[in-house]
Every structure is written in structure tokens, then in C-alpha cells.
Image (cartoon, coloured by chain):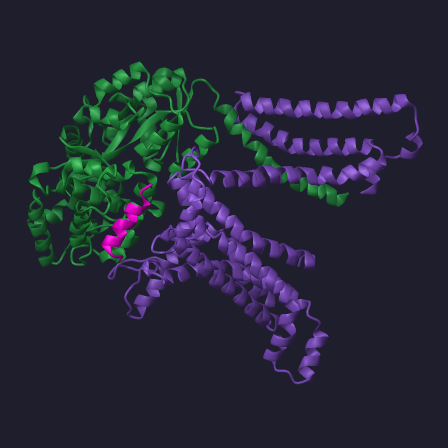
Amino acid sequence: MNTNITPAGDSKERGNTFLVSLGRLAVSIFIPLVAFAVLWAGFIFLRDSNAPQTIIALVAIIWGVGGVALLFWVTDYVVNRMPIVVAKKIQPFVFVGPAIAILAWYLFIPTMRSLYLSFFGPQSTNFVGLKNYIYAFTDSRMLEAFRNNLLWIILGTGGAVGFGLLIALLADRAKGEKFFKSLIFMPMAISFVGAGVIWRFIYAYKPLGEAQIGILNAIVTLFGGEPQAWFTIRGLNNVFLIVILVWLQTGYAMVIISAALKGVPSAIIEAGRIDGASELRVIRSIIIPFIAGTLVTVSTTIIILSLKIFDIVFTMTNGNYGTEVIASMQYKQMFRFYDYGRGSAIAIVLVIAVIPVMWYNLRQFSKREGF
Amino acid sequence: MKRMMLSLFIIMLLASPLFAGGAQEAAEEESNVVRVFGAFVDEEARRFEEAIRPFEERTGIDVIYEGSSEFETLISVRVEGGNPPDIAALPQPGLMKNFASKGVLVPMWSSLEDAVDSNYASVWKSLGSFEGTPYGVFHRVNAKSFVWYPKKAWDAAGYEVPTTWAELEALMDQMVADGVKPWAVGIESGGATGWAGTDWIEDIMLRTVGPDVYDQWVSNEIPFNDPAVKDAFEILGDIWLDPAYVYGGANTILTTSFGDAPSPMFSDPPKAMMHRQGNFITGFFPDDIQANLEEEVGVFPLPSINPEFGIPVLGGGDQFVVFNDSPAVRQFMEFLATWESGELWARSGGALFPYKNQDLSAYPNEIERSLAEALVNAKVFRFDASDLMPGQVGAGTFWSGVVDWLTGKNLDSVLSDIQKSWP
């Protein structure tokens, strides 16, 4: 990094005449201006051009990729022209600046706007005070969503972390560890919507007497049972949906926990065993305390995921049959009913619910300096 | 340095789609291009494009149709984002009113209004108007109050088309005695599950209490838990909640997609004899049935309940509204207001058109011809109530209320919940 900040021969140049520094200043201003002009011209071309789409797409890619490179190069160049004391102070902001700008534009401003809109009516024109929040905490459908999200957190996180821990412990002691772990990890590669499509087939229902295309009902009927419309069984249907999250996330929990397990000093485990501790006792009194930090981090990550859960419910039941969750209610209010006030209020409630978990999660992360 | 190059490369990779997004917008500026966005996709989109091809060839205007099954969501996102299509085909009048009240729609200009006045019955113009200003032009419409049956098996069993509700009930019992389920029903429809159920309720409402009370119900002048509505649910419940009358019972109603719902009628022998659905359902029939539609399928209007109101027709349709004014857009809208824009689609089937001056012989078979005739001649035509009600109800609690009721929830609490949700 240092070689970048200090151009060659910097010490010689320092203390040069006033004219040279003026020239350098001019160049420092001129180059960013040229860069800006180039980028702006590209933008104008892309916005107004009537050229064939392929050419426009090509220009867009060159402009986009090249533009980012140009911006980087120019800012880096300008910073390097500056006196080293100033450069050192500015350099970090040059690198972090774009990230902060993007976060502000895409995250902070929309959140603030949602907060603002949440105090207004459906069309965002008339101020309604806390009415949308009163709705969010009293409507029967919303209460159902809160209850279900709690269920998702408890069963989803518990299931994924529990199975992840169990499999990590077993795999640690088994032959073919890599093979089994890859197998369990594989669902992680599937999107939530993709998983929803897959599991729709697992839970598919056809009336008695027709060929059952759902594997679950095929098994049930094979043993002489009646086919069940799984999604319509109130209460249990939430569990059927949560199973999908567990299926998707167990691999993630397993991989992280497994890595932590490798870090448990074998000397202590050996000592425990020599002292006559049973395997269960070793796990409970040595391994678990050792990996507690990791368990918390994994749990909080999956808790956040469960709080935001949307795709699975949306593709499977669309919130019918008592499976509504907070995010699906938000989607419906916002995009189906066009009630921007209620939708925003629910979004804010969700954000507030996620923040403490997120904060705790980040604290755990920084404590452990990552995994 | 190496690491820096790597991160730079990653940044570039991440940023490139962001910038590439600009490419599409640029091309939209072309002056002889009209971009239309709508809810119909696949085969229907193809037939629409086919129907407007003569216009494109005649005028040199390129009409680019884009359809999405998530239309309702996307259109408001695009309008909010300041990037609306030139023209959108809105399936719900409520959506049109929403946009019109925000002032983002271009009202009908006089030559278009004249064309609408002379080519349509007045009901269509008022359905496309907001606070007295007309905006929407109807093109393809649908009529829903029809009962379909497998003609060969029907004739073989000697059934006769019922004209009154009592005859329908007698027929249902006769079918049960013959060992076949009278009805095939399915209301699953992804994010819109339940709408097929609301159509039944609306049809029954029109037949029991008539169009005036129906209008009061739509505008919530009578509450949703009014006895008139409860009565409609109970009439429907006599059929749907009785496993003897519906193939597969309530669970099959809930989990069968509306498009798959008619299929039990076409197994051999049929597992069900009747299916109530709009004209568009023929497009979902099995291919071999569609090929011989006239021989395989019969259709009759859902019978009258209270003779005072006769046989009303329930329907709906997409209305085309203008977001961006331009000469090409105007030309295209005026084309849509003529029978010529529907003729080719009518010939390829699966669509009805409301034009007064249409040529009924264009429809490919007797079935669609009779549906079009029923639509043009109906004394009482009412738009789908759930499309007219506020979104909270019409696309929300009414749909989910039907689902809840079918899963065994108490009818009174279902209805009062819907009423409570009325904004």
C-alpha cells in the first residue's frame, strides 16, 4: 500500500517552486474533470442514444466497468498528488466512500423514507399518526404473522442449529466426513424460491383414487393412509414450511460449527477422556463451551433469516391457512393493496425487530474476528 | 497490490449490471415504438401480438408487448419509479382509479372518446372512467357466468341443461345417484388463490338479490356481513361443503389450480360433470378437447335463482390506459377501440370482445359465438366485484376469506373479518 501513497522521488519534489505545485494542482483538477466529462458523456449516450440495443449494451458494459476503474484510478491519482500527511488521512475515505454512499442511497434513505411514509395513509398524502402501527399490532392477521414468525425463529433456528451441531459432531467422528458434509451442504446452493418449487412437489396433494405426484402422499397412500392436503392442516402447516428452512440452513450451520470443532484443542478433550468423562460429558462440558461463540453467531444469523422469511411462504401457501408471516403481510399491503402506509409501518416493525439481533450478531462477529 | 487488483475486479463485476441497466431505457425513446405492459403472458400474449400485427404493418409503428404474471406489483413499481410503459392493460378498474387519482394517466382525447362511444355499450365507458373522465379502452373481455360440461358423457347420461336453480339441484342429485360428482372446482391460483371462489359468490349475489344490491355491496353501502352476502355463501356452501357434490371435496377445491380444475370432466369416464368458469377456461382444456371443442364440450349460463333478475352476466376485462402521450400511442389506442383489433384474436379463439359492431361469425366455434352473443345482449352485465372493491378486500380478505371459510372457519366471523378490513 505504501508504495502507492508515496510516488517515486516525492522527497525531491517537496519544497519545489510555487509554479510546480500550481501545475500539479491544475493537473489534479484537470484529470478529475476529464474523467467526469467522459463518464457524463457515456451517461448521456446511454440515456438518449437510438443505437441498436447490442451496441448500447456493449457501451453500457464498457462504460460501467471502465467507469468504476476510471473512478478508482482518478481518485487514487488525486490522492497521491497530495502531500503525504493529507493523503494518509484521505486515502481511507476514498476506498470506503463509495461503499458508504451506496449504503446511504440504497439502505439508509429508503429506510428513512419508509419511516416517513409509515405515518401516512395508503396514498401517502394524509397524515394518520400511529394508525398504521396500531393496525400492525392489533390486526388478527398481523398477530397471526407475529406468532408464526416466533415459530419460525424457534423451530427454524433450533432445527437448523441443532441438526447442524449434531451432524458436525457425528461427521467429526466418522469416515467420509467430506462426502457427508458436502451432501448436507448442497441445499445451500438452492434459492428459497427454488426450494419452494421442489417442496411443492413433495407436499403435492391429489384426491384419493388419483395417482399421488407428491412423494409424501405417495408414501402415506402406500401404507394405506388417506392423502393429506398438508398445507391446509392449520398449525402443522407452519412446521411443514419451517422444515424447508431447516433443510436449507442446516448445511450452513454445520459447516461453521464443524470449523469451530476443529479448533477445540484435542489435548483438553483427551484429558477429559482420560479423567473418565463419557463422550456426552465431553461434548457438554468441553466442546459446547468452547464453540459457544460460534453457536451464538450461527443462531443469530439464522434468526435474522427467519425474521425476514418471505420466499418460502410466498411460493408455498401465500400466507393462506394461517401461515402468514410479517414479510408476506408487508408485501401484500404494499404491492397487492397499494397501502403504502401500512406496508411501510410493517417494514419498520420488521427492521426494529431485526436490529437487536443484528447488533448482537455483529458484536459476536467482531469479538471473534470472523469465524 | 495483487489484493487490490482483485478487489477492484470484484467491484467492477458487481457494478457492471448496475450500469448496464441503463441500456434498456435508452431504446424506449424511439418515436415509432409503443411499449405495452400487461398481465397476460405466453399463448395469450402471442395471440395479442398476432391480433395487432395488421396495425403494425399498416402504420410502421412497432408495438412491443411485455407481459408479466406479477403485473399488478410491477406496474405500480414502474409508475412509482417514474418509468411507466407507454400503455398498460390494467385488469382491475381499481388500479385505473388509483393511477387516475394520482394524475399519471392521460385522459381520452376527443377522437378516441368518439370511437368508444360508437363502438361500445355505455357500461364499458363508465367502467373505464374515473370521476367522470374516461381513461380506459376495453379490448379483450371475459364473461364468467358459464357452466361447462363434457358433452358426450352428458348426452349419454341423458342430462338436460337446467334453466332454474331448482332444476340444477335436481340434476346434481341425479348425478350423485348415477355415481358421478356434479362439480369440478379448483380455486388455487398462487398469490391470487381464492378469486375463483369470489366469482361464484358474485354470480350467486347477482341471481339472489340483483344488480342494485350488488352495486351497494361493491361500494360497501351494505356491509359484507349483510344477510344477503351470508345467504350467497350458504347457497355456495350447500354445494362446496358437501363432499358428495364436489370432486375431491374442500381440500381438492383449495389445492387444485383453477386451470387444472376442469380436467376431471375429461377423464374417461368423467369424474365430474360440471365446471363453472369464464370463457377463458377453454384455453386450459386438454389439447384433444380443444381440437374438437364443439363436439366435446357443452356450455350453459349459470341458471337463474330469483326469476326477477333473469340470467345476469358477470365479467371482467383488461382496460388499456395511456401513461405517455405520443402520436404513435394515440394511433394505437384508437386502433384498440375498433373491432378490427380484436378480430384476429377472436378467430384464433379464447377471447371475447365487447364491440357492438363485431362480426360474430369470426368466432371459431358455436360455443364462443354464443358466449359473445350472450355478452353483447345481456340486459344485466356486472364487472367482477372483487376487482371493483378496494384492494384490501377485493384482492385480500375476500380471497382469503373464501379460503378460510373452506377450511372450516365459522362463516359469521369470516364475513365480519372481511367487513372489518374494509378501508
Q: Residue at x 47, y 41 (%)?
A: A118
Q: How many marks?
A: 0
Chain A in the picture: what colour?
purple
Going by the image, does B2 lie left or right of A195?
right
Pick out the residue farthest to the front: A129
Q: Is residue B266 visible?
A: yes
Q: Nearer the viewer, residue A256 or B77?
A: B77
Magenta span: predominant SS is helix
Q: Is residue A149 above or below residue B85?
A: below
The stretch drawn in magenta includes residue B412: yes
Chain B in the picture: what colour?
green
The stretch drawn in magenta includes residue A108: no
Q: Is residue B367 above or below residue A171?
A: above
* Residue A171 location (% of width, % of height): 58, 70
In what quadrant of the picture does the C terminus of chain B appear?
top left
Splitting the image into 4 quarters, where does residue B329 fall? top left
Q: Is residue B402 visible?
A: no
Q: Residue at x 19, y 21 (%)?
A: B357
Q: Residue at x 9, y 55 (%)?
A: B173
Q: Is residue B131 above or below residue B407?
A: above
* Residue B35 location (% of width, % of height): 41, 26
Q: Please give the range of residues in magenta.
A: B409-423
Pick out the residue farthest to the bottom: A276
Q: Nearer the viewer, residue A135 or A228?
A: A135
In what quadrant of the picture does the N terminus of chain B appear?
top right
Going by the image, does A224 lie left or right of B206?
right
* Residue A226 location (% of width, % of height): 27, 66
